[in-house]
Image (spheres, helix red, strand yellow):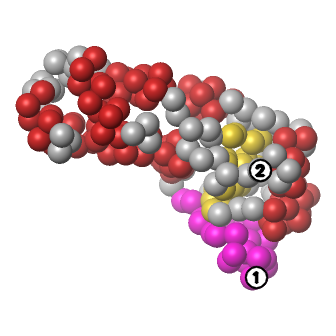
Amino acid sequence: MIHKSYLIEQNFENLKNKIVLFYGENLGLIDEFKDRILKKHKNVLRFSQDEIIKNNDIIFYEINNVSLFDDQKIIFIINVNDKFLNIVKEFQLNRNGNLIYLFSEILEKKSKIRNHFEIAKDLDIVPCYKDNEITIRKIISDKLKDYSGLTTQIINRIIENGNLDRSKIINEIDKIKTLFINKKIDIDLLDKLLNL
């Protein structure tokens, strides 16, 4: 089932299935989804596709090994591509209630794994496309809403410095929050902070 990323940002509970693929060029958004999952769940097992392909017994051992302390396991698998499709099909047959999150960069329309996730009713897929200026403005406004002195000019400077890259914008916002502890933005100090 295909989900729009902005709807998942608003309500992560829209993901109904136990296996989810996040993919796309917006690595900042994908990182935000990872952070959200990590905040919600304490114990997350992390693997790369290459680790599992070399020895897929490790992942199936983890999936089938029942824990006395956790009802379900949370599994992250990064750098997924079409080589991983057969393992995904095995996951569908044998997942034991575990949550499995797969992460990838850009997957072309002809990608077999992308097509499989888009068609299957028991899988979720979230394409993470590049942000536009409107979404970046909203992010800045939302994250700095409690700060006085936030003007259109300041927002434009942050956007200019971050070049519409969500990761860079979030980094700049974190710097601003660190410098302006009193929650009052001074444009001259901001210019020095942003190296403008």
Real-space CA distance between mark 1 and mark 2, rounded to the nearest whole angstrom? 27 Å
User: At 52% from the left edge and 34% from the top edge, which residue is drawn?
Assistant: 131
Identify whether 133 is placed above or below 40: above
Identify whether 66 is placed above or below 15: below
Tell me where residue 102 sits by quadrant.
bottom right
Please state if 53 lies on the left or on the right of 25 as rendered.
right
- Mark 1 lies on residue: 55
Label 1 amino acid? Asn
Please state if 3 lies on the left or on the right of 181 as rendered.
right
Q: Which residues are magenta?
A: 43-67
User: At 73% from the left edge and 32% from the top edge, which residue is drawn?
Assistant: 3
User: How dense is the environment of label 1, judged by Cα within 10 Å: few (below 14), some, or many (20 and up)?
Assistant: few
User: At 71% from the left edge and 62% from the top edge, which residue is drawn?
Assistant: 80
| Circle on res. 108 | 2
Q: Secondary structure at mark 1?
A: loop
Q: Position of residue 114 (x, y in %)?
A: 81, 49
Please say whether residue 184 is one of the residues in the magenta stretch.
no
